[in-house]
């Protein structure tokens, strides 16, 4: 139970720090280019993020279907899909730091980095280490 409390505290702290950084970034950009232009830029990145996520998501779904039809496990395509979903969501959030991370999640060359991180984390969870109790703890007899 103590571990879950620490994880929750870490998540809450990360959300607060991210929000403060995003607000600071918005304030700096609005000082440089003005409030209306900043709002327009944030709106444009949200729309572009939704369109890019839709396009890249279709590619990942097509690849997953192709792999399943050939009898291959669609692991890479599923991880790509998770990265694309996260990237699209980050681009739709207001703020420029989340936009930068979201963009890197959508672009295939930089998505490789995130896919490797996800793969390592999943391997650690499946071996019983890391933050696995939240996902597979009940299957392992942990409560």
Image: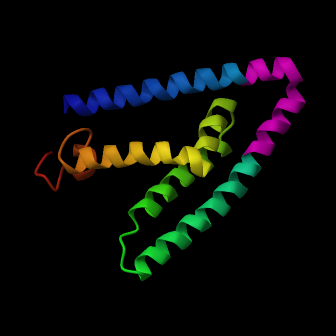
**Quadrant placement of the N terminus:** top left
**Quadrant placement of the C terminus:** top left
Residue drawn at (35%, 31%) of the image: 8
Residue drawn at (89%, 31%) of the image: 36
In the rendered image, the vertical position of residue 90 relative to residue 32, given as above or below: below
Residue 41: x and y in percent read 82, 37
- Magenta residues? 26-45
* Residue 110 among those drawn in magenta: no
Residue drawn at (47%, 63%) of the image: 77
Left or right: 97 with respect to 128? right
Q: Quadrant of residue 70?
A: bottom left
Q: Quadrant of residue 2?
A: top left
Left or right: 23 with respect to 18? right
Residue 83: x and y in percent read 51, 51
Left or right: 18 with respect to 27? left
In the rendered image, the vertical position of residue 83 relative to residue 17, given as above or below: below
In the rendered image, the vertical position of residue 2 relative to residue 41, given as above or below: above
Residue 93: x and y in percent read 65, 40
């Amino acid at each position: 139970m103590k571990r879950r409390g620490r994880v929750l505290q870490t998540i809450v702290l990360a959300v607060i720090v991210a929000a403060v950084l995003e607000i600071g970034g918005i304030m700096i950009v609005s000082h440089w280019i003005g409030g209306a232009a900043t709002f327009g830029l944030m709106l444009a990145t949200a729309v572009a993020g939704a369109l890019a996520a839709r396009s890249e998501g279709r590619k990942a779904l097509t690849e997953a279907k192709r792999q399943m039809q050939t009898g291959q496990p669609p692991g890479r395509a599923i991880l790509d899909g998770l990265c694309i979903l996260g990237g699209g969501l980050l681009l739709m959030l207001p703020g420029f730091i989340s936009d930068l991370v979201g963009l890197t999640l959508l672009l295939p060359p930089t998505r490789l980095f995130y896919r490797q991180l996800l793969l390592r984390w999943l391997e650690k969870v499946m071996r019983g280490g890391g933050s696995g109790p939240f996902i597979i703890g009940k299957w392992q007899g942990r409560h």
